[in-house]
Image (cartoon, rainbow, N blue to C red):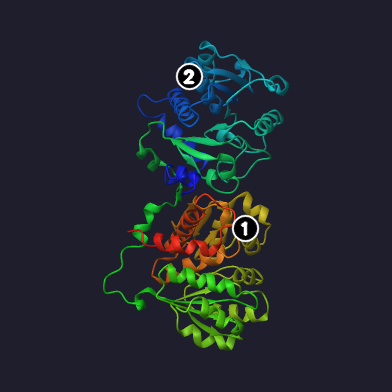
C-alpha cells in the first residue's frame, strides 16, 4: 500500500510557486478576456465546495472562519454555495462587513443574501454548537508575520476543536514561501490550493499543517505560468525516472556503470558503509569498493560479497585506492577523529567527483574557510547544514530554500537539504531548486542517510550529471521508503528499502 498523502500529492502540478508568484499569476489572469477578481473568487469558492462534498460526503453542518482579504472572500463564496445547497452554515467573521473591500465585500453580500449571518468570534458561543467540519478562510498567502492576537485566538480554537478542517489556499499561519509557522498555524486535514501550488506546503512544517493537498487551477491556461518573471521550484515525480534511468543496452558490461569507492566505517560504524554499499549495488553501480577499518572486513564480506573491501588504517593506505574509482563517496560512519581527518585530507586532494555525507560534512565545516569545488554533491540534514553555514539549525529550518541555495553557492556543485520535503539546489546558472514531497516519517531512522548517499553516488557513477544524480537519488529513496512502509511507518529500517529500490531504478 502506498502512503495516501503521497498519492494525493501526485495530483499536484510539478511546478511550485511563492506567494508573490501566485499573486502575479492572479494579476495576469485578470488581464484575460472575461476574467476579473470576482470570477476567480467564485471559481475558488466553487472548487472548495466541490472538494468538501467529495472528501466529506456526510458533512452537512459547516463552521466557516473568514478573514478580511481575498481568502475570506473565498470562504464567503463557499458559505453562500453551501447555504443554497441546504447545508447548515455558521460563519464567523474576523472583519466586520463594513470594513471589507472589493471582491470580498461582494462575496460577503452574496452570502448574506443567501441567508448566511456573519457572527463575530466568541469562543464561548461556539462551545455547545454542533458542526461536522471547519473551514479555514482566515489568512491564506497574505501573511508576512505572526498573526494578530484575534487571529491567533481563532487558530488556537480551531486546532483544539478536534474537528476535521478544510483550509482554503493555505492553512492560516503557515508561510507560503518557506513552510515556516508564524507563531501558530491551522492544522488542516485537507488544503486546496488555488491557481498555483505553494512551495511552502511541501517542506518544513508545511506537510504537518496542510494534510492532504488538492489543487484547482481555476480554469486558467497553463501558458500563463510562462509569463512569470522568476523560476518556480520543480516538484520531483516518478514521471522523471525514465529519462534518468533508460533501459541498458544488451551489450552492457560492468565497466560501463562506474566504479564507486566508499570511504568510512570507523570503529563501531561498519554498518554505515555496508548500507551505503548495498544501496549502490542495488542502484546499478558496476563496481563498489569499501575502504574502511580492518576490523570490519570479515563482517562486510559476509554481508555483501559482491562488494570489494579494503582495510585502510591511514591516509597512506588510502592513497593507492584513489586511482581505482570513477566516483568517491566520503562520510558514512566516518567519525571525526584523526583517522577520519586523514581520509578527508586525501580525498580533497583528488579531482574525482565526490558525494559527501555525514561526518565528511562535519569535518568540512571545521575548516577555517569554506571548501569550494564544482564536482561534488553535499547531502546534509539541517544540523549538518547549519554547521556548514555557520548558523543555527533553527535558522536553516526557518527558510530551507534560502539555506540550500546558500549551501550550493558557498560550496559549489550540488547541495541537498534533507528532511520533510527534501530540497536539491545547483550552483550552476539556471540550476534552480527541486523539491521531493514523497517519503514518510518512518524514514527518520538510523542508516537512511547512508542508503541515500550510496544511491546518489551510484547514479553519479553511472554518468548522470551531478544535479540529475542528486534529484533522482532523492526521489528514488523517498519512493522506495513509501513502498517499504506500506502505511506502517514506525519500525521501518533502512535495509527494508533495498527490495523496492531495485524495482524503482528499473522504471521501464
Residue 358 spot, x, y in % from top left: 60, 68
Q: Name the residue under label 1.
A: 382
Label 2 sits on a secondary structure element that is: helix
* Total numbered badges shown on the rendered structure: 2
> Of the residues tagged 1 and 2, which is closer to the observer?
2
Looking at the rendered structure, which numbered label has been put on residue 81? 2
- Disc 1 to disc 2, C-alpha distance: 45 Å
Q: Is residue 300 above or below residue 14?
A: below
Q: In the image, what residue occupies the spot 67% across and 53% down?
A: 394
- Residue lying at the far left in this picture: please name it: 250
Q: Is residue 233 above or below residue 83?
A: below
451 vs 376, nearest the viewer: 451
Specify few, some or many for label 1: CA neighbours under 10 Å numbering under 14, 14-19, or 20 or more: many
Q: Is residue 131 above or below residue 459?
A: above
Circle nearer the N terminus (1, 2): 2
Residue 164 spot, x, y in % from top left: 58, 32
Amino acid at each position: 500500500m502506498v502512503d495516501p498523502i503521497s498519492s494525493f500529492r501526485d495530483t499536484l502540478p510539478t511546478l511550485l510557486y511563492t506567494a508573490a508568484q501566485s499573486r502575479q499569476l492572479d494579476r495576469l489572469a485578470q488581464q484575460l478576456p472575461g476574467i476579473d477578481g470576482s470570477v476567480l473568487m467564485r471559481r475558488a469558492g466553487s472548487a472548495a465546495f466541490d472538494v468538501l462534498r467529495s472528501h466529506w460526503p456526510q458533512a452537512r453542518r459547516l463552521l466557516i472562519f473568514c478573514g478580511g482579504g481575498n481568502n475570506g472572500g473565498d470562504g464567503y463564496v463557499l458559505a453562500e454555495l453551501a447555504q443554497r445547497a441546504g447545508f447548515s452554515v455558521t460563519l464567523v467573521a474576523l472583519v466586520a462587513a463594513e470594513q471589507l473591500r472589493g471582491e470580498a465585500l461582494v462575496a460577503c453580500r452574496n452570502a448574506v443574501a443567501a441567508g448566511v449571518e456573519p457572527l463575530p468570534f466568541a469562543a464561548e458561543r461556539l462551545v455547545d454548537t454542533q458542526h461536522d467540519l471547519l473551514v479555514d478562510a482566515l489568512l491564506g498567502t497574505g501573511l508576512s508575520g505572526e498573526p494578530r492576537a484575534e487571529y491567533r485566538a481563532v487558530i488556537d480554537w480551531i486546532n483544539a476543536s478536534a474537528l476535521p478542517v478544510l483550509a482554503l489556499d493555505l492553512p492560516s499561519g503557515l508561510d507560503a514561501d518557506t513552510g515556516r509557522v508564524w507563531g501558530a498555524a491551522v492544522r488542516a486535514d485537507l488544503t486546496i490550493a488555488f491557481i498555483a501550488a505553494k512551495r511552502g506546503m511541501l517542506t518544513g512544517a508545511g506537510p504537518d499543517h496542510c494534510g492532504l493537498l488538492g489543487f484547482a487551477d481555476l480554469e486558467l491556461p497553463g501558458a500563463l505560468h510562462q509569463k512569470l518573471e522568476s523560476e518556480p521550484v520543480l516538484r520531483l515525480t516518478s514521471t522523471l525516472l525514465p529519462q534518468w534511468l533508460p533501459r541498458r543496452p544488451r551489450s552492457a558490461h560492468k565497466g560501463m556503470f562506474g566504479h564507486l569507492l566508499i570511504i568510512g566505517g570507523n570503529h563501531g560504524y561498519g554498518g554505515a558503509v555496508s548500507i551505503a554499499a548495498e544501496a549502490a549495488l542495488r542502484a546499478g553501480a558496476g563496481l563498489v569498493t569499501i575502504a574502511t577499518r580492518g576490523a570490519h572486513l570479515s563482517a562486510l564480506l559476509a554481508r555483501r560479497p559482491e562488494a570489494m573491501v579494503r582495510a585502510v588504517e591511514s591516509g597512506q593506505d588510502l592513497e593507492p585506492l584513489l586511482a581505482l574509482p570513477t566516483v568517491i563517496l566520503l562520510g558514512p560512519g566516518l567519525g571525526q577523529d584523526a583517522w577520519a581527518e586523514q581520509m578527508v585530507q586525501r580525498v580533497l586532494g583528488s579531482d574525482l567527483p565526490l558525494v559527501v555525507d555525514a561526518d565528511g560534512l562535519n569535518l568540512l565545516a571545521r575548516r577555517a574557510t569554506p571548501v569550494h569545488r564544482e564536482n561534488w554533491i553535499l547531502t546534509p540534514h539541517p544540523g549538518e547544514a547549519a554547521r556548514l553555514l555557520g548558523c543555527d539549525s533553527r535558522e536553516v529550518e526557518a527558510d530551507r530554500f534560502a539555506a540550500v541555495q546558500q549551501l550550493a553557492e558557498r560550496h559549489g556543485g550540488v547541495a541537498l537539504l534533507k528532511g520533510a520535503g527534501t530540497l536539491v539546489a545547483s550552483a550552476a546558472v539556471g540550476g534552480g531548486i527541486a523539491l521531493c514531497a514523497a517519503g514518510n516519517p518512518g524514514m527518520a531512522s538510523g542508516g537512511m542517510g547512508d542508503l541515500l548517499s550510496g544511491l546518489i553516488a551510484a547514479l553519479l557513477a553511472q554518468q548522470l550529471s551531478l544535479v540529475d544524480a542528486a534529484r533522482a537519488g532523492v526521489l528514488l529513496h523517498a519512493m522506495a521508503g513509501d513502498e517499504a512502509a506500506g502505511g506502517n511507518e514506525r519500525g521501518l529500517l533502512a535495509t527494508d528499502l533495498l527490495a523496492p529500490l531495485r524495482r524503482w531504478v528499473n522504471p521501464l
